[in-house]
Image (tube, helix red, strand yellow):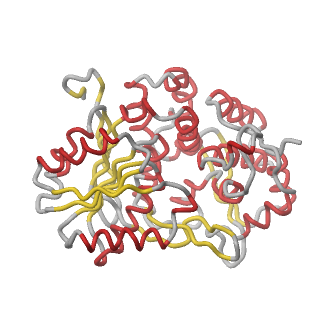
């Protein structure tokens, strides 16, 4: 379907989770019509706490606010400084107090406008204020559109013994609606846009078992148009990636399937979580550009996962090369300087929240478009994977 007046296709993907079903609308120019999209879904909402990334253009935030107002839902605008260090309980508590000051009740909304950090925090606030308000996710980064805004994971980080533990405090709380307007990606900094492509490549690496066996080849062939941010290519990219994630979430909403299901979405992430908060690590070796963005860490994690899988005899070298080449073509890092010794990174990986009874669980590629959960992988193979991303 083409959105009238834009020349850009519009797609709607249905997420059917066990707790709730909802639509993800993908198109262009959608945020200016936010109120009209929200009102049919939440007809009795009177107010909305609109939590937005402080870096977003004022005009975009105000446009969303006007649209909500026109639909009879009074917005309470609240800027949020989006960073991993700011994604903590203290900030969530502050946002709870803003919701209380606005006298939001159980019929009202929390609207998340921004990237994955904003979506996680706003979703957590919505899930926990008065035991749960309805949430509208409006992702403005590629990473958030294809991953963080879909599936209902919310949370904040926990600082423990000097280490920032990613998403250790959180809950599952599905949104009522996701509005992904790809025109928001046109002004996204190049580095952030490319970081989002890491999650797209991850989805392509598992897509064969989740309804889209052609996603890998399409992504590989369309990468030029995607990097040019051609609107219809972006709509296709976002919609197909959301459909893969929706299929996974629909099969295993709360990640209870230890052998697959939603756990497969963690491909590359155990490595990524261990390295993305390390000080001084940057994609180009310049400490000024540290820390790594989440998507950059995921790209490194995908490379390390491929190398680990090759070392374990689970993945063909030729397929690992294809992944490496696509990561490079997307402008993502495949190696970094100043990485600690493999044994130290392995220790950090062992504390990942996905570990069970102290046993590491790694998602590793096993074929084109396919991956599996590997319990307690051989440490030497994991260290070889880490070594594959360590640049002297």
Where's residue 314, x and y in %? 75, 48
Where's residue 17, x and y in %? 35, 60
| Residue that appears at 68% across and 30% down | 328
Nearest to the observer: residue 336 or residue 371? 336
Q: On screen, 145 above or below 250?
A: above
Nearest to the observer: residue 162 or residue 146? 162
Where's residue 62, x and y in %? 26, 44
Quarter of the picture containing the N terminus is: top left
Nearest to the observer: residue 134 or residue 89? 89
- Tell me: 106 left or right of 352: left
- Tell me: 303 left or right of 212: right
| Residue that appears at 37% across and 68% down | 95
| Residue that appears at 62% across and 68% down | 165
Which quadrant of the view contains residue 13?
top left
* Residue 366 visible in rendering: yes
* Residue 243 visible in rendering: no
Where's residue 54, x and y in %? 42, 50
Q: On screen, 392 above or below 344?
A: above
Which quadrant of the view contains residue 316?
top right
Nearest to the observer: residue 128 or residue 58? 58
Q: On screen, 87 above or below 115?
A: below
Which quadrant of the view contains residue 377?
bottom right
């Amino acid at each position: 379907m083409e959105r009238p007046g834009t020349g850009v296709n519009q797609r709607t993907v249905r997420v059917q989770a066990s707790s709730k079903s909802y639509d993800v609308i993908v198109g262009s120019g959608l945020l200016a019509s936010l109120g009209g999209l929200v009102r049919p879904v939440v007809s009795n909402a009177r107010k909305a706490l609109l939590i937005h990334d402080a870096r977003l253009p004022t005009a975009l935030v105000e446009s969303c606010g006007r649209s909500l107002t026109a639909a009879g839902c009074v917005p309470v605008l609240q800027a949020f400084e989006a960073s991993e260090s700011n994604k903590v309980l203290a900030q969530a508590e502050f946002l709870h107090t803003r919701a209380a000051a606005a006298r939001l009740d159980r019929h009202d909304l929390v609207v998340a406008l921004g990237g994955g950090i904003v979506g996680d925090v706003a979703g957590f606030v919505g899930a926990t204020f008065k035991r749960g308000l309805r949430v509208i996710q409006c992702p403005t980064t590629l990473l958030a559109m294809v991953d963080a805004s879909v599936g209902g994971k919310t949370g904040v980080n926990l600082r423990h013994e000097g280490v920032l533990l990613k998403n250790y405090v959180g809950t599952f709380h599905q949104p009522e609606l996701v509005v992904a307007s790809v025109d928001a990606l046109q002004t996204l900094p190049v580095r952030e846009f490319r970081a989002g492509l890491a999650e797209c490549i991850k989805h392509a690496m598992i897509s064969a078992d989740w309804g889209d066996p052609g996603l890998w080849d399409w992504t590989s062939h369309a990468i030029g148009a995607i990097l040019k941010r051609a609107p219809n290519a972006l709509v296709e990219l976002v919609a197909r990636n959301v459909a893969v994630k929706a299929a996974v979430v629909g099969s295993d909403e709360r990640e209870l399937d230890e052998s697959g299901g939603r756990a497969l979405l963690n491909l590359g992430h155990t490595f990524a979580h261990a390295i993305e908060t390390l000080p001084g690590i940057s994609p180009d070796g310049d400490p000024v550009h540290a820390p790594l963005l989440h998507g950059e860490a995921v790209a490194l994690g995908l490379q390390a996962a491929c190398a680990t899988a090759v070392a374990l005899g689970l993945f063909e070298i030729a397929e690992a090369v294809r992944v490496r080449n696509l990561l490079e073509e997307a402008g993502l890092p495949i190696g970094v300087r100043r990485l600690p010794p493999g044994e130290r990174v392995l220790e950090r990986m062992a504390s990942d929240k996905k570990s069970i009874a102290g046993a590491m669980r790694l998602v590793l590629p096993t074929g084109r478009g396919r991956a599996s959960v590997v319990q307690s992988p051989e440490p030497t193979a994991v260290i070889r994977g880490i070594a594959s991303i360590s640049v002297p």
